[in-house]
Image: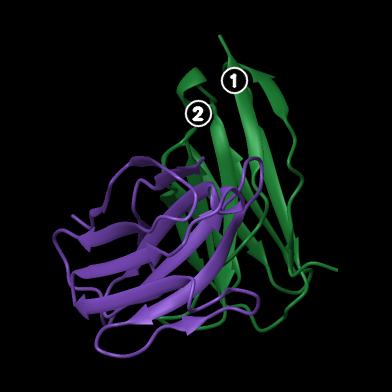
Chain colours: A green, B purple
């Protein structure tokens, strides 16, 4: 079993839809959870950062972490064509200086 | 803020040659930089962790003599792919962790290496 599992998709939705992206993980010691967005042939861009369990909202994006289920989610409301990208979940054990463990990424396509 | 640059963005080289990739944190100091490799439709795979002023820590299966990493200052780390072969063709991405902060890593735009 891989440390971080993420359905690669692709996921296609119409503009305005609510998108749900998910990752599961096996290591209960992970404490920091992140979502990155990566456009084709570009470096990942940090979208959301969460420590431990709970929800975090930023504009149209909401990140949820359920440590008891080892499950994290990213919701995108009112999706736009510009949201079309690959979304990578990532997590780490502890504080700064620790390498991130990435999911495989989910490719999202939002059609207008 | 928190901008990371990489140079070059794209490089094509002949088999057997060496290629150097630079990673710079432009507006912050990064005690730790990471080097990742990403193959098409795959996730980022950590190659090595680089701390300023010390030897890099390589992940299992990554040849340290082939992928030379130098982290000479708090804003610059370099990755040199020595004696490159076609199987080394990939997208190489660096990230920098903010010194003293939470584990928030900022990624460079990546370098696409093609070895002929």
Going 58% across and 47% down the picture, which residue do you hit?
A: B86
Residue, x 68% and y 51% (percent of image)?
Answer: A104
Earlier sequence position, callout 1 versus callout 2 = 2
Tell me which chain the residue with mark 2 is part of: A
Which label was assigned to residue A110?
Answer: 1
- Location of residue A68 by image quarter: bottom right
Quick one: label 2, few (<14), some, or many (20+) residues within 10 Å? some
Can the viewer see residue A100 in this picture?
no
Q: Residue at x 54, y 26 (%)?
A: A84
Identify the mark at residue A93; answer none if there is no mark.
none
- Mark 1 lies on a secondary structure that is strand
Q: Secondary structure at mark 2?
A: helix
Q: Looking at the image, which is closer to me, B48 or A64? A: B48
The image shows residue A5 at horizontal and vertical percentages of: 76, 58
Up-down relation of residue B76 to residue A95 (above or below): above
Frontmost residue, B40 versus A28 = B40
User: Residue A84 or A75: which is nearer the viewer?
Assistant: A84
Identify the residue under disc 2.
A83
> Considering the image in quadrants, where does the N terminus of chain B appear?
bottom left
**Up/down of A62 relative to A67, above or below:** above
Q: Position of residue A11 (x, y in %)?
A: 71, 29
Residue A74 position (above or below residue B100): above
Q: Is residue B112 above or below residue A51?
A: above
- Furthest toward the top, the residue is A112
Residue A103, percent from left and from top: 66, 56
Res B90 visible:
yes
Q: Residue furthest right?
A: A1
- Residue A69, how many percent across, how many down? 79, 69
Label 1 lies in what chain? A
């Amino acid at each position: 079993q891989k440390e971080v599992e993420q359905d690669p998709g692709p996921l296609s939705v119409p503009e305005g839809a609510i998108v749900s992206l998910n990752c599961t993980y096996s290591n209960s010691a992970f404490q920091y959870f992140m979502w990155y967005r990566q456009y084709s042939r570009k470096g990942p861009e940090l979208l959301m950062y969460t420590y431990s369990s709970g929800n975090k909202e930023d504009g149209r994006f909401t990140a949820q972490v359920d440590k008891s289920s080892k499950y994290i989610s990213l919701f995108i409301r009112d999706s736009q064509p510009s949201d079309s990208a690959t979304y990578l979940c990532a997590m780490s054990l502890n504080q700064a200086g620790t390498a991130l463990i990435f999911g495989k990424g989910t490719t999202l396509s939002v059609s207008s | 803020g928190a901008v990371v640059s990489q140079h070059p963005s794209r490089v094509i080289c002949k088999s057997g040659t060496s290629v150097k990739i630079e990673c710079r944190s432009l507006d912050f100091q990064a005690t730790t930089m990471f080097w990742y490799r990403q193959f098409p439709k795959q996730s980022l795979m950590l190659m090595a962790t680089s701390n300023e002023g010390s030897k890099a820590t390589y992940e299992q299966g990554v040849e340290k003599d082939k992928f030379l990493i130098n982290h000479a200052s708090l804003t610059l780390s370099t990755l040199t792919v020595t004696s490159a072969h076609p199987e080394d063709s990939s997208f190489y991405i660096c990230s920098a962790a903010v010194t003293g902060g939470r584990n928030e890593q900022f990624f460079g735009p990546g370098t696409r290496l093609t070895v002929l």
